[in-house]
Image (tube, rainbow, N blue to C red):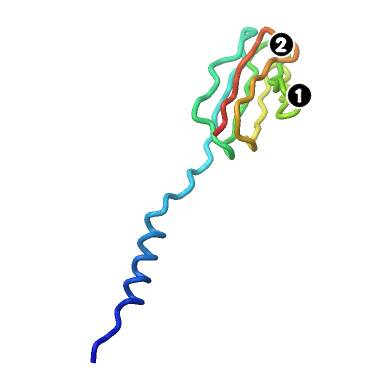
Amino acid sequence: MRLRRTPLYVASAGVLLLAAWPAAAAPHTYTFVMDKLKFGAVPTGLHKGDTLVFINKDMFKHSATATDGHSFDVDLAPGSAKKMVLTKTGTFPFICRYHPNMRGVLVIK
């Protein structure tokens, strides 16, 4: 009697495909510093789901406000920090509402 092995091969192939599927990257936390009336370097490699911690090391109040008027608006008192989870993908220019010469761009993939 000849055994049928086809279902076993198909099941084994399915397990291999699932095992080889890449896992989603775990979210990361990045920092973004404001100091001496300047934005620090904007972190690169940001992804949806990551957390961005804004840190105001200056003696002045600052914000990180998206220029589109609605994507994000983080307001920071001197010496404070706030977290923001990145919920959208795209390119987001931003300014400091109190010092409009402070400008940056977040790129979120």
Q: Amino acid at mark 2?
A: Phe
Classify 10 Å Cα crowding around label 2: few (below 14), some (14-19), many (20 and above): some
Residue 96 placement (x, y as % from top left): 70, 15
Residue 41 placement (x, y as % from top left): 53, 17
Q: Report the front residue among 50 and 2.
A: 2
Disc 1 target residue:
69
Residue lying furthest left in this view? 1
Q: Determine the residue positioned at 32% across, 72% down.
A: 9
Which label's residue is closer to the chain start, 1 or 2?
A: 2
Q: Report the front residue among 34 and 42.
A: 42
Judging from the image, what secondary structure is the residue with disc 1 in?
loop
Classify 10 Å Cα crowding around label 1: few (below 14), some (14-19), many (20 and above): few
Task: Determine whether 23 is above or below 39 in the image.
Answer: below
Q: Quadrant of residue 83?
A: top right
Task: Determine whether 66 is above or below 36 in the image.
Answer: below
Q: Report the front residue among 51 and 90.
A: 90
Q: Determine the residue positioned at 36% across, 71% down.
A: 10
Which numbered tag is attached to residue 19?
Answer: none
Disc 2 target residue:
60
Q: Amino acid at mark 1?
A: Gly
Judged by depth in the image, the label closer to the viewer, 1 or 2, is 1
Q: Is residue 75 left or right of residue 90?
A: right
Q: Is residue 55 left or right of residue 12?
A: right
Point out the image quarter for the N terminus.
Answer: bottom left
